[in-house]
Amino acid sequence: FDQLGDHTLVTCPGRFRNARHNRVCEVIVAYLKAAGLSILSEPMNHFLACRLRQDIKIYNWSGGRSAFLDVTVVDQLQLNILPRTMQKPMHILNVTEKQKQDKYELACKAHNVKFISLAFSAFGGFGKSSNYFLSEVAYSLATIQQRAYSDIMSEIRHRISSTIWSANMKTVL
């Protein structure tokens, strides 16, 4: 804990939290590119009128529609969510994904794009939407690379989790 007892070691201060988030985005972008998808990182001001920012845009994701991804890394030891995570550790990730989905959905529908919220735990866990999305990417890669889906999915999960842990360690060292 810090001097005031408000934050655990996993709770990253500003620049480290942003770095952790950005590194997870970079991993996802690498796999999307490997799957042959056309992407744009940090598509600024797409929804200028409503001031919503996305992390990644995928062109022609599904049925010719583009998709916007929003990545969140949740520290389950934050005092404001700790009581809920003690009872259902992964539930907060699904709640976070749902809250982001609700926040972006109307703007995305108005622009005919799909919105996909991805939430990851600071301990390496994945929300339901994240698992589903990454499994779609893994299936595409399995077809392209003629590898087993399970191997690719395991690799993606490992790489994202280790990226998060690596970024967590930088806050401690």
Image (cartoon, grey):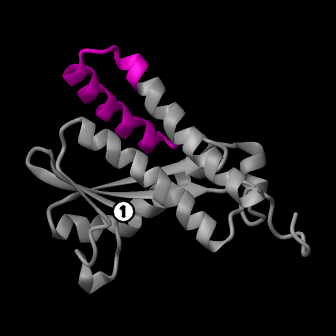
User: For this view, does 61 lie left or right of residue 5?
Assistant: left
Q: Please state which of residues 73 and 18 is positioned toward the viewer in this rendering.
A: 18
Asked if the stretch drawn in magenta spans residue 21, the answer is: no
Q: Is residue 16 left or right of residue 27?
A: right
Q: Is residue 9 left or right of residue 48?
A: right
Foreground pick, 91 / 48: 48
Residue at horizontal 61 percent and vertical 56 percent from the top? 74
- Residue holding disc 1: 55
**Relative to 171, residue 159 above or below:** above
Q: Position of residue 59 (x, y in %)?
A: 15, 53
Q: Check disc 1 and give the amino acid type.
A: Asp
- Which residues lie in the magenta part? 127-152
Q: Secondary structure at mark 1?
A: loop
**Which image quarter holds the C terminus?**
bottom right
The residue at the point 77 percent across, 57 percent down is: 172
Q: Residue at x 58, y 39 (%)?
A: 162
Identify which residue, 156 or 54, lies in the foreground: 156
Which residue: 39% across, 24% down? Answer: 152
Is residue 120 placed above or below 156 in the rendered structure? below
Q: Nearer the viewer, residue 25 or 51?
A: 25
Q: Picture coordinates of residue 44 (x, y %)?
A: 28, 75
